Amino acid sequence: PAAAQAAVPAAARAMDASAAKPPAGRRDADSVQAHAGTSTAYAARVRAWLEAHKTYPKAARMRKQQGTAQVTFVLDRAGHVLDCRLTGPTGHALLDAEVRAMVARADPFPAPPHTIKGERIEMDAPVEFSLQR
């Protein structure tokens, strides 16, 4: 467990798995907000899965568009996306469209472990587009 904990990025360890959402403006930009009953380990896997499917649209790069979107999506027990909505747009249509496309490309997500109850697992995630990286 200690070695496994060290392998998880600090941002993933900082994720909040509680049902309560943090106050506006207090959300860690590198976290996935896991709702009630969702483990932080699973939320970390989902975050990594999302990042692996993210691309920065070339046209947005050329226009120097940056921003962080907030996306909420619902997964079924097999990891398939049942619903996806942008709950906090970046202010740039190209980047907002990429967030939706990223979630679609990531489908199916890793299936939730049996320790997570329910048929629908709702997740919130910030998606950052920065030219500084």
Image: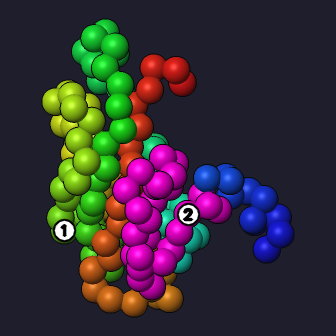
Asked whether residue 5 appears in the rendered view, the answer is yes
Which residue corresponds to the image point at 31% horizontal and 50% vertical from the top-left? Answer: 70
The amino acid beneath tag 1 is Leu
Task: Give whichever of 10, 6 is nearer the camera.
Answer: 10
Q: Residues within 10 Å of mark 1 (few under 14, many from 20)?
A: few
Pointer 2 and pointer 1: residues touching (CB < 8 Å)? no
Task: Give whichever of 122, 55 is nearer the camera.
Answer: 122
| Dominant SS in magenta | loop
- x, y (%) of residue 11? 61, 53
- x, y (%) of residue 89? 23, 41
Of all residues shown, which one is farthest toward the right? 2
On residue 82, the disc is 1
On residue 15, the disc is 2
Label 2 – label 1 distance at C-alpha: 23 Å
Asked whether residue 53 appears in the rendered view, the answer is no
Start-end of magenta stretch: 12-38
Q: Is residue 30 above or below residue 132?
A: below
Describe the element under mark 2 as helix, strand or loop.
Answer: loop
Badge nearest the viewer, 2 or 1: 2
Residue 65, image quadrant: top left
Describe the element under mark 1 as helix, strand or loop.
Answer: strand
Scheme of colours in the image: rainbow
Q: Is residue 96 above or below residue 70?
A: above
The C terminus: image quadrant? top right
Residue 95, image quadrant: top left
Which residue corresponds to the image point at 39% horizontal and 31% vertical from the top-left? Answer: 129
Which residue corresponds to the image point at 46% horizontal and 55% vertical from the top-left? Answer: 27
- x, y (%) of residue 83? 18, 64
Q: Residues within 10 Å of mark 2 (few under 14, many from 20)?
A: many
Which residue corresponds to the image point at 31% horizontal and 72% vertical from the top-left? Answer: 122
The amino acid beneath tag 2 is Met
